Image (cartoon, helix red, strand yellow):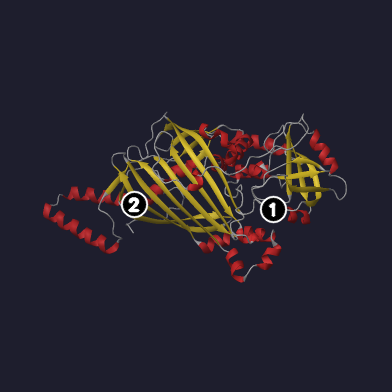
């Protein structure tokens, strides 16, 4: 390892990771010049240093590249095309390899402008949009993330975010946080009759924002952090093929998880004035597994019968967890900015594999990095169908928009291979409660929240698992009230129906479900 590498301590300290090596080299060069040594003495010194490096470090090419300090132009707005996807596989819990693999995607056009820059950092503004690019406008049903992101923008009440960043461009403060918190508090007060309900998802988001306003940045523009990872606040010298290794820690529910980060200069393109860097991060499996035990236990509680059928090896594996990150960055050799970035993060926990993909590209530049096929494959997901409500109702489906902020756990299913023609019998589900609530998306909209009994929740979970990728119907008193497509197994035992601002239809349904032993019927939609 190059001399001087130290614990970085933060995810975004890429420049700090490389700084000691570059700084030591610059100091050595200055000392050589100041001593005024002769040519022969200088040659002997160089040969001696080369021999030491050959003995103590991995071999790499002699080619060196200087990546300049991040120095973006003030006042210039840059557009970015951002592609995202999540893949979730819960095959272990359903004993059907591949049958429970679900995918959700999104494509966004966001814009960023540097407002000012000084010795302490930058002020930037991100303009946020949920609309699909024009060439994909007709394929909205294949990009479910965009609809969820639109819900998030409405919930937070913003169309742009102004940030303070460090000199690398990594966010460190959010302007207008008080107004955002006020928007969320207002929504939390109208999502249910009890404004202080501890189980309110919106209230939980409010608490997260109050604890750390940068939570908003992580939800609405996480790309800012990924772009900043490749940027440095000073000139950096790297040798082709050289690996720079450092460690840091991240906190997961009070557990400090060590992470090993390995940076490498992969290639350069003199004609395009770019260089490609790679990053591999591995999380310590022992401490990461420890940090995930509460979540794993909760998952197992949802599948008690399946847990009994697992082998010792399967159960041991399910109690373990791992995480790793692989990323590449195309860096400008003119101003040190990230022109393109690609990242894949894989988390295995509780027998479930979650893989997230992100590709970011400056809109005015050609693609350099390979794009994962999950981001480019033509959409296969079927369209959503609005609920069947009276003609005077504002018809729309809101599955559970409050979950839109949890991108690391969200997924929407593509049809399961081999299951599209399977016969699935209708089920009758007993209702525990049904109540009218304010929508977490808009204070002017209402929704009917139906909670099933424990037995009903288990039946509904199994039904939705078998029906992934297929259209279903929910019937109340023999009438179809909603016809959703099933994109993932629903394990919470809750069904949400929305009709916008008109609540009369929802009130009628709630009355029908208020009688003792009320039931709803769920079945496949007739083909």
Picture quarter containing residue 74? Answer: top left
Rendering coords of residue 151 (x, y %): 63, 37
401 relative to 488, above or below: above
Which residue: 39% across, 36% down?
Answer: 365
Is 225 placed left or right of 104 in the picture?
left
Rendering coords of residue 241 (x, y %): 32, 54
Q: Secondary structure at mark 1?
A: loop
Is 296 placed left or right of 65 in the picture?
right
Quarter of the image with the C terminus is: top right
Rendering coords of residue 94 (x, y %): 65, 59
Query: Outermost residue, bottom direction?
Result: 312
**First reached walking from the N terminus: tag 1 or tag 2:** 2
Is 271 placed left or right of 488 in the picture?
left
Labelled pair 1, 2 in contact (Cβ < 8 Å): no
| Gap between marks 1 and 2 measured at Cα | 50 Å
Count of picture labels: 2
Rendering coords of residue 256 (x, y %): 53, 58
Which residue: 44% across, 50% down?
Answer: 327
- The disc label shown at residue 150, or none: none
Q: Which residue is mark 1?
A: 491
Circle 1 Cα neighbour tier, 10 Å, few/some/many (<14 / 14–19 / ≥20) = some
From where the camera sits, is residue 131 visible? no
Q: Secondary structure at mark 2?
A: helix
Q: Which residue is mark 2?
A: 20
- 26, 338: nearer the viewer: 338
């Amino acid at each position: 390892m190059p001399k001087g590498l130290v614990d970085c301590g933060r995810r975004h300290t890429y420049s700090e990771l490389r700084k000691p090596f570059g700084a030591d080299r610059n100091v050595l060069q200055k000392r050589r010049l100041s001593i005024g040594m002769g040519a022969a003495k200088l040659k002997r010194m160089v040969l001696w240093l080369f021999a030491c490096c050959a003995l103590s470090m991995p071999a790499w090419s002699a080619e060196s590249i200087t990546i300049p300090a991040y120095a973006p132009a003030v006042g210039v707005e840059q557009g970015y095309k951002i592609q995202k996807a999540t893949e979730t596989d819960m095959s272990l819990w359903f004993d059907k390899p591949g049958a429970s693999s679900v995918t959700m995607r999104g494509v966004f056009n966001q814009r960023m402008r540097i407002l000012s820059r000084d010795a302490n950092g930058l002020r930037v503004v991100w303009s946020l949009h949920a609309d699909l690019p024009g060439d994909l406008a007709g394929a909205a049903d294949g990009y479910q993330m965009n609809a969820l992101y639109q819900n998030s923008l409405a919930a937070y009440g913003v169309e742009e975010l102004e940030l303070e960043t460090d000199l690398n461009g990594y966010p460190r403060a959010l302007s207008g946080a008080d107004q955002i918190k006020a928007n969320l508090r207002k929504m939390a007060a109208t999502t249910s009759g009890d404004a202080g309900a501890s189980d309110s998802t919106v209230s939980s988001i409010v608490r997260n924002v109050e604890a750390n306003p940068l939570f908003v940045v992580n939800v609405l523009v996480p790309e800012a952090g990924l772009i900043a990872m490749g940027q440095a606040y000073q000139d950096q010298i790297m040798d082709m093929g050289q690996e720079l290794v450092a460690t840091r820690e991240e906190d997961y529910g009070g557990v400090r998880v060590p992470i090993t980060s390995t940076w490498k200069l992969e290639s350069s393109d003199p004609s395009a004035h770019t260089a490609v860097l790679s990053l591999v991060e591995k999380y310590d499996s022992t401490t990461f597994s420890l940090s995930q035990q509460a979540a794993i236990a909760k998952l197992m509680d949802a599948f008690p019968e399946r847990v009994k059928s697992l082998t010792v090896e399967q159960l041991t594996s399910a109690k373990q967890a791992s995480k790793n990150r692989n990323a590449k960055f195309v860096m400008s050799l003119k101003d040190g900015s990230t022109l393109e970035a690609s990242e894949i993060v894989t988390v295995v926990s509780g027998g479930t594999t979650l893989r997230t993909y992100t590709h970011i590209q400056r809109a005015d530049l050609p693609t350099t990095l390979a794009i994962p096929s999950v981001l480019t494959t033509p959409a296969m997901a079927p369209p959503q169908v609005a609920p069947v409500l009276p003609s005077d109702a504002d018809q729309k489906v809101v599955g559970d928009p409050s979950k839109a902020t949890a991108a690391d756990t969200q997924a929407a299913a593509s049809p399961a291979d081999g299951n599209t023609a399977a016969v699935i019998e209708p089920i009758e589900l007993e209702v525990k409660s049904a109540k009218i609530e304010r929508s977490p998306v808009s204070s002017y909209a209402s929704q009917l929240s139906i909670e099933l009994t424990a037995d009903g929740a288990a039946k509904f979970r199994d039904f939705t698992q078998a029906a992934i990728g297929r259209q279903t119907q929910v019937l109340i008193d023999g009438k179809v009230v909603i016809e959703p497509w099933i994109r993932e197994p629903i394990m919470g035992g809750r069904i949400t129906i929305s009709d916008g601002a008109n609540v009369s239809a929802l009130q009628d349904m709630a009355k029908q479900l208020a009688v003792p032993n009320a039931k709803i019927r769920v079945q496949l939609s007739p083909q």
